[in-house]
Amino acid sequence: MTAPSAPGPQGPPRTPEQALAELQAGNRRFVTGTRIHPNQDAEHRAALAAAQAPFAVVFGCSDSRLAAEIIFDRGLGDLFVVRTAGHTMGAEVLGSIEYAVTVLNTPLVVVLGHSSCGAVQAAREAVAHPAEPVGHLGWIVSAIVPSVELAAARQADDVDQIVDLHIQRTVQQLPQRSAVLATAVRAGSCAVVGMSYQLEAGQVRILPG
């Protein structure tokens, strides 16, 4: 398997701790305007044609302002990205994450939410004024409603507070719903971390587990 290179002499991250540090470093470069755009050259593209070895899964919201490779200053082959509105999960999401963890040996899974999330706002509105959303949007809203209700029980009504709780709840649910991921986490070969992206500042916050 051909592994992508990362900045510095150490090569690509191999542990959850190294992978997390690399994402944090990339986000700092993005925020400060010192991006290095790694692994975006023609030679690296050609080297990746036969195989990939991403160092992190980013399971994030589909919001157009949440492009993982940009906000973490990464390139081709670095991140295995799975995105749905409100980072809601079904079998397709779980299977995709399991593929990255078990087949590609990816050491880190990040649940990436963001401030002012429209999916969370829709779920909060649905709780406040019950109405059935049109089409399949109802499935997304219903998946987020438990996070809205949990926030209400904790007297948290601000959208961004609900976003943080929804991210944390997703982090907890992933190994609960995926025995494969739970096994990798117990073995220490993979970790699951929650992050919240601030749209205005461009900064990512790591949330407590």
Image (cartoon, helix red, strand yellow):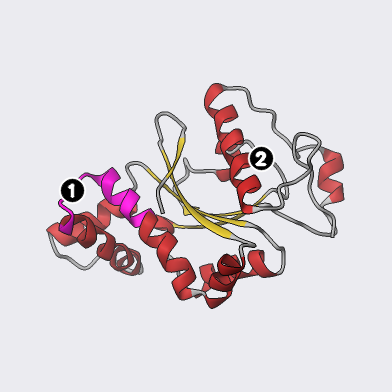
Label 1 sits on residue: 157
Label 2 sits on residue: 74
Q: Which mark is residue 191?
A: none
**Counting other residues with Cα less than 10 Å from the Cα at mark 2, is it few (<14), some (14-19), or many (20 or more)?**
many
Residue 112 spot, x, y in % from top left: 47, 50
Task: Please report the bounds of the magenta region as a residue range.
Answer: 153-167
Q: Given the image, on which type of amino acid does mark 2 rest?
A: Arg
Seen in the picture, residue 185 relative to 22 is either above or below; the reply is below
Q: Nearer the viewer, residue 166 or 13?
A: 13
Look at the image and say whether residue 22 sits in the magenta stretch. no
Q: Residue at x 44, y 73 (%)?
A: 176
Residue 56 spot, x, y in % from top left: 62, 53
SS at circle 2? loop
Look at the image and say whether residue 160 sits in the magenta stretch. yes
Tag 1–tag 2 contact (CB < 8 Å) = no
Seen in the picture, residue 53 relative to 134 is either above or below; the reply is above
- Is any part of residue 88 visible from this angle? no
